[in-house]
Amino acid sequence: MTVVALPARLRARKTLLLAAASLVLVAWTALVVLPASAATTLLSQGRPATASSSENAAFPATAAVDGNAGTRWSSAFSDPQWIQVDLGAPATISQVVLQWETAAGKAFQIQTSNDAASWTSIYSTTTGAGGTQTLNVSGTGRYVRMYGTARTTAYGYSLWEFQVYGSGGTTPTSAPPTTPNTSPGSCGTTNAALYGTATASSAENDGSSAAAAIDDNTGSRWSSLFSDPQWIQVDLGASLPVCQVKLQWEAAYATAFQIQLSANASAWTTVYSTTTGTGGTQTIPVSGSARYVRMYGTARATGYGYSLWEFGVYTVGGVVATPTPTPTQPAPGNCPWVNSSASTASKVSQLLGQMSLTQKTMILHGTNPTKTYIGEVVGIPSLCIPTINFQDGPSGVGDGLGGVTQMPDGVTTAATFDSAYAKLYGQTIGAEFAAKGVNVALGPTINMIRDPRWGRSFETYGEDPYLAGQMAAGDVQGIQSQGVMAQVKHAAAYNIEQPAGTIIVDRRTLQEIYLPAFQTAITQGNAASVMCGYSNVNNVPACQNPQLLNIPLYQQAGFTGFVGSDWGGAHSTVESANAGMTMEMPGGYFYADFLAQAVQNGQVSQATLDTMVTRVLTKMFDFGMFNKAPSGSSTATVTSYAHQQVAVQGATEGTVLLKNNGVLPLSTASGSSIAVIGVDAGAGTQTIGGGSGTVTSSGTTWPITGIQNRVAGTGVTVTYNEGTDQNAAATLARNSTVAVVFASDNYGHEEGDNTSLNLPNNQDALIAAVAAANPRTVVVLNNNAAILMPWLNQVAGVFEGFYDGQGWGKAIAALLFGDANPSGHLPISFPTALSNMPTSTAAQWPGVNGQVQYSEGMQIGYRWYDAHNVAPLFPFGFGLSYTTFGFSNLHVNAISGNQATVTATVTNTGSRAGTEVAQLYVGHPAANGEPPHQLQGFQRITLNPGASGTVTFTLPMRAFAHWDDASQTWIASAGSYQILVGDSSRNLPLTGTETVATTVTVPLH
């Protein structure tokens, strides 16, 4: 264990369900980088690191010394800022390596110190250029820091890795470092128990386990059996200097109990004892160093057991423990391609040469039924080929496995317009897939939302192919950084669950709307795998359609991975193999004996078969499956507090403020009252959709809990009403200062589409009644996609959260009260009526006479609204803030080196710090036949009141290209292109022109 200091704040078609594991929190393990040679030993890795600030809990200082270039420290957006590492003892420093993220230091110093108080500068620059900087230095000291005084961007300072080389120092121990903003001897404010694991003498039932007391959720609790004595203990992961214990009792509290410390969970020392416990929240100062801390109860205040909402443990300096990464073990077997350092191509060739025809087909199909996972390709021990395990889904580890983090859905994630967050999201779920023993994660879902009535809209990244591609690439990169293959789905034109028949769509629309996100996931995300879907496109099933597989993926995008069928999505042998489908799932009907026969009779060539096998083996080698033993377990608890914080971050950044007449943010003035209304605010809160996109929550924070926690101690009264009695709800609203109505659609589900976009269960009428009783009514929505709002003009405020994952209650509380400034923007257009949508005719949705006509062509979403001059209820890209922003100073630079650079200034013109999403759209010359304008760039920028910052967009030639049916290629035609910048598809105040001098062909890779 390493002790680190943290900042003070930190398919229905697939029916396999597995028993949920007990909820024991574990921390996210990091990758290990071996030390350099003795002369230049890497001294900093795993050492305690602190910083002047962290942007949020997802970017602590420790992430810069964890040996994982997929995690980073990011500071607040101001100067100066610093990050320092404690080497444990004085050392001779010879080299410092700074691996900057985009937000780098322009002016900074490298400093050393023996006491973290008096500093000596050993390097200084005012012309830092970012990237990876290797600095040869000379100095001595126990502490080494980067002290930044000027930044290259409007963001903070951000380092993937801060590496210090030299000689001396010490091996990391559990000695506590100094916490930023906390003096070494003071008690910190970070709850170390959140990073540990909990056990207890008993639990009243499965819903009241010990883990519920260390989940940072006062809506869940540990409750014991109804007897004495009982105890609950926390394993902090390492010996830490404990200075305070905080007990948040439910009504069943202890009158007599002790707080005890132990180094081994066997011999205990009592550091606090009482026989007059009063319940409520007890904050108990203690003193001692221990790995284990327990509450040992001997007398109860009630006839029930002991019951704690939360059991908090605080340490001197705010230190917590993180686990040492478990070393990987070599792969079993003595085959020459196992644990080999030869090139992947040579190992694949060597192995392929030893495989029989039967063995080749064996790794091209799944086994049904499976033993553990939703999909399994069984290995071949005689050839040392391991089993490949597959598991859903896009929002975390799915198919009923427990002990995981339920993340926000795809639409919420897309609403962040933050590809860096998408990567962090991928890293988080990738780590959980890996720890569950999964090799292939079935996701992300990157199909277009053509019509918001589609049942699986919630899984996707919205209606725009550029946005979907950028978010997918980040997600894929994150997942695969954890050693897990991502399988992006479902290629392609899969946008309806219950079509009347085949999809009729022209090739240009396929190329420009329904295929680009898959190609971006390949060219930018390096996706290992793609799933072909259930759709039948132009009378050809997707999994045997070369227009969806071979041509766009392998030929155009240079794909080197494998294509797997959706479960039961294969319909042929010869056609599928020759069109590019590599693997049949979940069983082997078409790709077992039938495939072998097709090869033997020449219908599928030997070369095609070998290519299919090569694609699978290549990715198995690339992901180390022949170099490390299988690890992880489907029954492991893999969620952690850090992972749950990533879920909260996504819910916070991805929730969109649609209306605010000044009632928001809510006041916490003493004496005010809040009516919280709706089933969706309590136990019925909808945080995820149904089908294969479902993820089992390890502990959902309800909105009512989040709100109650936020106002505790302020004198604000919060009263909850489920809203099942409309009159009672209205009466409560009338008698309250403000009313907040939570409503959800329950429309998001695989295999089913929706006939309506109105809220079900009379929720529209409930909202109208509440708003009539109190005009200070705020509506908070959880929806599959867009929804109609017949009550919009009656209410004071509206939030759209989509399906926000298990941290929803914390996120919405922060947003309602202004602790977080809303920054989400819509990734889909909201219609005013079903008749005012691109797919309003029956022929278009759900289709007639065996066909679904995609007759709107490229005009889906905002493209249609703009082309037809139809005002949506809310446009694509729209989102409000508690501050305001202005745009100015557009500069469009001439194309150079096959790309153009565009810059603009964004200014915070309001009174609060906030984040804006600057969006760039390109309008083509009329002769190109394109929609009026299309998204080709976006950037989040955070600014203090009155501050300005520059956003920069780099436009490759693909941004000016369109599909040409005649030449069957992408071309950028000569002409003038409009450049538009603003904050939604309907608010683009900055306009300029870019000139393409000559017509050019634009390759995808």
Image (cartoon, rainbow, N blue to C red):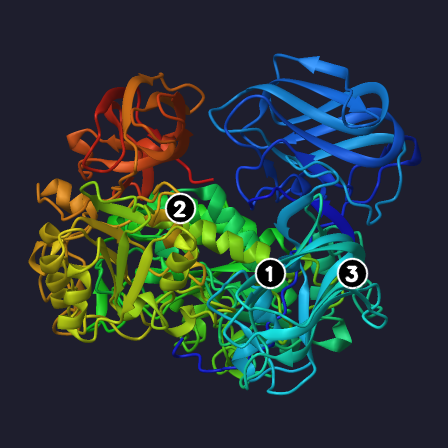
Residue at horizontal 32 percent and vertical 18 percent from the top? 892
Residue type, numbered disc 2:
Glu
Left or right of residue 952: residue 476: right
Residue 556 visible somewhere in the drawing: no
Residue at horizontal 62 percent and vertical 21 percent from the top? 148
758 vs 619, nearest the viewer = 758
**Is residue 593 positioned above or below 413 on the image?**
below
132 vs 705, nearest the viewer = 705
Q: Residues within 10 Å of mark 3 (few under 14, many from 20)?
A: many
The percent position of residue 934, horizontal first and vertical second, equals: 26, 38
Residue type, numbered disc 1:
Ser
Residue identified by numbered label 2:
653
CB atoms at circles 1 and 2 under 8 Å apart?
A: no
Sequence-earlier tag: 1 or 3:
3
**Is residue 749 positioned above or below 708 on the image?**
below
Q: CA distance from mark 1 to mark 3?
A: 18 Å
Left or right of residue 847: residue 645: right
The percent position of residue 921, horizontal first and vertical second, equals: 27, 33
992 vs 163, nearest the viewer = 163
Left or right of residue 611: residue 551: left
